[in-house]
Amino acid sequence: MSVAEASQTPLDRLRRLGEARSLAIIGIWLGVLAVWLSVPPFTIRALVVPAAAAVLGASLGLWALTRGERKLGWWAIGVALLAILVALWFQSEESAELESVFSIGLLAATFRFAAPLAFAAMGGIFSERSGVVNIGLEGMMLAGAFFGIVVVAETGQWELGLLGAMAAGAVLALIHAFFSIHLRADQIISGFAINFLALGVTGYLFRSIYGTRGTPELEERIPNVHLPLIEDIPFFGDLFGNLNLMIWLMFAVVLTSFIVLFKTPIGLRIRSVGEHPKAADTVGISVFKVRYAAVILSGVLAALGGAYLSFGTGNAFNENMTAGRGFIALAAVIFGNWRPFGAFGACLLFGFSSALALRLQGSPLLPSDLASANLLSTLPYVLTLVVLVGVIGRSRGPAAAGRPYVKQ
């Protein structure tokens, strides 16, 4: 350590590290920009332009490395190198082939894939902010998908279907809350038990009720919202003019979650119970009541994501149709540092990867054989692993998460 560095106060070193971290993040976004410039609507055919953005991003990452920000610095450099390779690949492809993949439909599909993840992620944030780890989001989504579509099939009302899905998610969440809060069971084991319970119950009832013919054709499903004033606006009209009602509800849930958690006394109670339950109990806050309410709310929100899968974006139920989305939502919670907007950004990232993988499967940019299709289908899960590796050591969850509270 040099004399100048030794003479710095801890506050100076912290400020210096914060500056390096900010520049490294800018470097990462410059790498993303380098790829974006090579695809529609820009489709810049001169390699020097995206290459310049990537080189600048790598330079910022290298500068961050010299200032002590190693993880984000290496991320900026890695993203820049990958961006140059991808830009080189796109330069060799025809513009029409790129437009078949990178169009406004890709962004609309991103919202569709991100919606169920965002509902479950918001539920996970409420639960973990109160101090209860909810690994059972996957099972609660699956229960919401099945029981919601059963109610719709029997009543013909999608509104009642949403209520049925929410009730199913709330029941499973109540079971998880009882074992985790009152019986002080291991929350991870309890959550996995909920997942297996939901998988077994929905699979058994699905085969018992519908047999091999599957769920019947629904007369009603969650409708799209048409916005006449926006539909005629270029780009925005194609993206926002005809979205499903659940996607708009997703936006509202994310915004409301942030307001409730960080701008209201209720949110302060939830966060205090998740950080210092003994102190919260001392000032008269009921730790058990707050945790029960937060966990049940997480089940309701996760079930809404499942309902969107079965009779929102889809029109049928299949066994294990959530396919690990609850665990991806948990990864989004960690990546977003247990904050609604951060988790929503992660859900958009995972949704984009799912939409991109689906579009690449039928595009001329890649071989159309079965092996390529199977490999592309793993893209969201590989991205989940990469993101989790990248944030390990940087994210700090609520201090009391996963620890049962014993009232004194």
Image (cartoon, grey):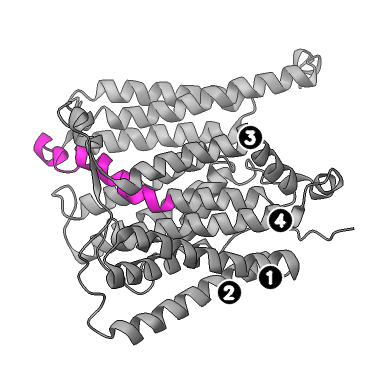
Q: Give the number of the disc on residue 289.
A: 4
**What segment is highlighted magenta in the picture?**
93-117
Q: What residue type is labelled 3?
A: Thr
The residue at 21%/55% (across/down) is 361
Task: Point out the image quarter for the C terminus.
Answer: bottom right
Give the mark nearest the N terminus, 4 or 3.
3
The residue at 26%/27% (across/down) is 37
Q: Give the number of the disc on residue 264.
A: 3
Mark 4 to mark 1 CA distance (whole Å): 14 Å
In front: mark 1 or mark 2? 1
Task: Point out the image quarter for the N terminus.
Answer: top right
The residue at 42%/77% (across/down) is 202
Q: Mark 2: give few (<14), some (14-19) or many (20+) Cα within 10 Å.
A: some
Magenta region, main secondary structure:
helix
Mark 1 to mark 3 CA distance (whole Å): 29 Å
Against 364, residue 94 (above or below) is: above
Mark 1 to mark 2 CA distance (whole Å): 11 Å
Query: Label 2 belongs to which residue?
Result: 193
Give the mark nearest the N terminus, 4 or 1.
1
In front: mark 2 or mark 4? 4
User: Are circles 4 and 3 on residues that touch, CB within 8 Å?
Assistant: no
Give the mark nearest the N terminus, 1 or 2.
1
Query: Label 1 belongs to which residue?
Result: 179
Relative image position of residue 32 (x, y in whole percent)? 36, 32
Give the mark nearest the N terminus, 1 or 3.
1
